[in-house]
Image (cartoon, grey):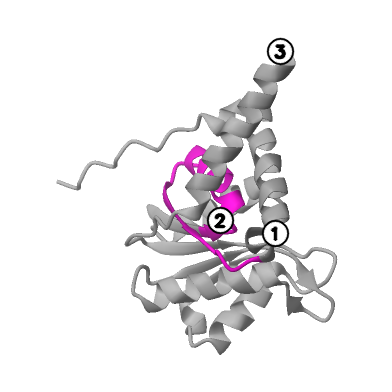
């Protein structure tokens, strides 16, 4: 009985994770934050890193935010995920002056915590977070835990979203991660900041 309830809980939450991640929620914000993904040998962006960056550039070019924040440290292959995203974004026409790098993080929790430090220095209160669809609910929750108002925007053209098998696997994996961390799952949006007098 308990096993059945747990299975129902995992797959029920996986359905919520998938539905949340597939929906575009971007709106006007102070910055777009792009979460890193794997860098291939030679500093080549992986498909996920490229798709996330291209999505962020699209939002920037639509005028949703004046700044892009690239978050991701050095993984197996240098340079940092953030630096590879910057190089791609500038090739796509984004001025380097409109970009900020966070190059120390190696997890979603660190993405949020370290990016929020930079964002507070920039005076940002509301952000749009870009990542793979399966990743967006957990990413939003971590940014909420760090006190930011967050909208989300999915990079739909990634391998893990286009392959049904990968989409199922990674979505279930995210549901399990959220169930194992109820503090993250239950994080609420920060209270609205009252307008200045």
Q: Residue at x 76, y 74 (%)?
A: 79
- Residue 173 rendering spot, x and y as whole percentages: 71, 41
Nearest the eye: 70 or 49: 49
Check disc 3 and report the residue beneath it: 2
Magenta stretch contains residue 121: no
Judge from the rendering whether residue 120 lies leftward or rightward of residue 29; answer left or right: right
Judge from the rendering whether residue 109 lies leftward or rightward of residue 152; answer left or right: right
Q: Residue at x 45, y 41 (%)?
A: 147
Specify few, some or many for label 2: CA neighbours under 10 Å numbering under 14, 14-19, or 20 or more. Answer: many
Q: Residue at x 71, y 11 (%)?
A: 1
Q: Is residue 177 above or below residue 3?
A: below
**Distance between mark 2 and mark 1 Cα atoms:** 10 Å
Check disc 1 and report the residue beneath it: 104
SS for tag 3? helix
Q: Are marks 1 and 3 in contact (CB under 8 Å)?
A: no
Q: Which mark identifies residue 115?
A: 2
Q: Which mark identifies residue 35?
A: none
Quarter assignment of residue 67: bottom left
SS for tag 1? loop
Q: State whether residue 142 appears in this view.
A: no
SS for tag 2? helix
Query: Of marks 2 and 1, which one's residue comes earlier in the chain?
Result: 1
Q: Which residues are magenta?
A: 130-158
- Residue 66 rendering spot, x and y as whole percentages: 38, 72
Q: Residue at x 70, y 68 (%)?
A: 81
- Give the foreground label among 1 and 3: 3
Query: Of marks 1 and 3, which one's residue comes earlier in the chain?
Result: 3
Q: Is residue 180 above or below residue 77?
A: above
Specify few, some or many for label 3: CA neighbours under 10 Å numbering under 14, 14-19, or 20 or more. Answer: few
**Distance between mark 2 and mark 3 Cα atoms:** 39 Å
């Amino acid at each position: 009985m308990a096993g059945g309830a747990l299975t129902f809980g995992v797959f029920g939450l996986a359905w919520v994770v998938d539905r949340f991640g597939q929906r575009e929620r971007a709106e006007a914000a102070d910055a777009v934050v792009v979460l890193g993904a794997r860098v291939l040998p030679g500093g080549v962006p992986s498909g996920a890193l490229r798709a996330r960056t291209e999505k962020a550039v699209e939002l920037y070019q639509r005028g949703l935010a004046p700044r892009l924040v690239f978050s991701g440290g050095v993984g197996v292959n240098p340079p940092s995920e953030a630096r590879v995203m910057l190089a791609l974004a500038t090739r796509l026409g984004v001025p380097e002056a409109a970009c900020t790098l966070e190059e120390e993080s190696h997890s979603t929790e660190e993405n949020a915590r370290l990016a929020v430090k930079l964002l507070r220095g920039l005076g940002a209160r509301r952000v749009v977070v870009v990542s793979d669809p399966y990743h967006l609910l957990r990413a939003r929750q971590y940014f909420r835990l760090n006190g930011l108002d967050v909208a989300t925007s999915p990079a739909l053209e990634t391998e893990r979203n286009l392959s049904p098998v990968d989409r199922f696997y990674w979505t279930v994996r995210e549901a399990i991660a959220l169930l194992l961390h109820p503090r993250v799952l239950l994080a609420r949006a920060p209270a609205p900041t009252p307008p200045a007098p």
